[in-house]
Amino acid sequence: MSRRIGLYLHIPFCRSKCLYCDFPSYPGQEAQMEAVIGRMTEELWAWGKRLPDARVETVYLGGGTPSLLPPTLLERLLSAARDAFLIAPDAEISMEMNPGTITERLLQTAVRSGVNRVSIGAQSAQDRLLKLLGRIHDFAAVKRAVEQCRRAGIDNLNLDMMLGLPTQTLMDVEETLERLIALSPKQISCYGLIVEDGTRLKRLLDDGVLQLPDEDLERDMYELARSVLENAGYAQYEISNFAKPGFSCRHNVDCWQRKEYLGVGVAACGFLGTTRYRNPVTIPAYLAGEAPEITELTAEDERFESIMLGLRMTEGISDAEFCKRHGLSIRQAFGDKLDGPLQNGLLTFDEGVLRLTRRGMDVQNAVLVDLM
Ligand code: SF4
């Protein structure tokens, strides 16, 4: 029997660094593209030899900015993936694209290479907020990107937007939602801004140059997004993700369900059996062939991961599935740690399914702390 896996390909290049970004993405490194794709090709072949029975169900090209790749390198990478693995005929093959970097030629190559889903980093419909974030595009570029994808034959589109931005108002959020919905994507993802150490955003906040919306306003933005999206026919399937029926991102759902996936490229993470690994995070270290960082999960780690990842999804965690996987029921594994969040209305445990309530989704981290 074949081993079903996902494949994540990390493209670590960006045109410039956004204000809030601490992802492994490096501007000004275009000269390294050929070498990085060459090394990724070798990595793919090595994995293919190690897992000869693997069948790839989903491929996700993330970054960074995968749409910065020259078409020839994109083609080389995806054809190396096909040489290394059996890719299911109905595989979901997603590619992140940054508006302002998309060309007709790249899209044609992507489609020819099997890409059938595109995720566009729209982030906001207000050009002033895009500028403030250091994004390289305006909203007109988002609309153009959607049209370009459709012309190339890709209609399975996700649009990302961000909440909780400095100077962002509820009206901004409402207008962004309306303008994204008007573009009729299959999925919209709403991410709350996270302030990471070492970013320019952190320094500007620490220096008092920028301020974030307060917690109540941020919660109101999230609630507004949920209700506008649900009214428009986008069902929430995960804390940040809303999709038309049948269009949830299969790759991400598989990750949250702890299915196996390989990560290939700079800083890419993978999960096989009871092992998680992360490739070297800098381009020079990756090209030098430094070893990945490996974490062996204990049985307790695995149980906690199942809860931590499973609770992100609105369908929750089936006790029967949990028991099949871990040999213990959720109650046996977590005992009275469940009582606080259940009594406080943050979790429900009905008909053998553990779920966060709507309120619990707002404070997921606090619930997880209780369960740790
Ligand atoms: S485009 Fe994405 S990965 Fe690149 S710098 Fe901006 S946020 Fe980071």
Image: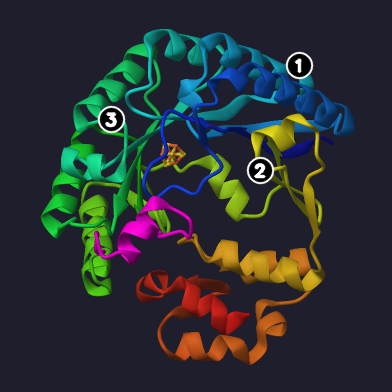
User: Nearest the camera: 273 or 216?
Assistant: 216
Label 3 or label 2, whichever lies nearer to me, is 2
Residue 38 visible in rendering: yes
Q: Secondary structure at mark 2?
A: loop
Q: Residue at x 25, y 56 (%)?
A: 225
**Whole-percent x and y of residue 21?**
44, 47
**Quick one: label 2, few (<14), some, or many (20+) residues within 10 Å?**
some
Amino acid on which the number 2 mark rests in the picture: Val
Labelled pair 3, 2 in contact (Cβ < 8 Å): no
* Disc 1 residue crowd, few under 14, some 14–19, many 20+, Cα 10 Å: some
Q: Does any atom of ligand 1 lie closer than 8 Å to the CB of label 3?
A: no
- The amino acid sitting under disc 1 is Asp
In which quadrant of this rendering is ligand 1 seen?
A: top left
Instruction: Determine which residue is flagged by label 3.
Output: 137
Q: Secondary structure at mark 3?
A: loop
Real-space CA distance between mark 1 and mark 3, rounded to the nearest whole angstrom: 35 Å
In the rendered image, residue 10, in percent from the top left (x then y), is placed at 60, 34
What residue lies at 81% left-to-right and 57% top-to-bottom? 274
Residue 371 horizontal side relative to residue 198, left or right = right
* Of residues 329 and 207, the one drawn nearer to the viewer in this rendering: 207
Find out whether residue 195 is within the magenta segment.
Answer: yes
Residue occupied by mark 1: 83
The reply to whether residue 193 is in sight is no
Which residue is found at the position 68% from the left and 49% from the top?
Answer: 259
Q: How many marks?
A: 3
Q: Which residues are magenta?
A: 193-212
The amino acid type of the residue labelled 3 equals: His
Relative placement, left or right, of 38 versus 163 is right
Q: Are marks 1 and 3 in contact (CB under 8 Å)?
A: no
From the image, which quarter does the N terminus lie in? top right
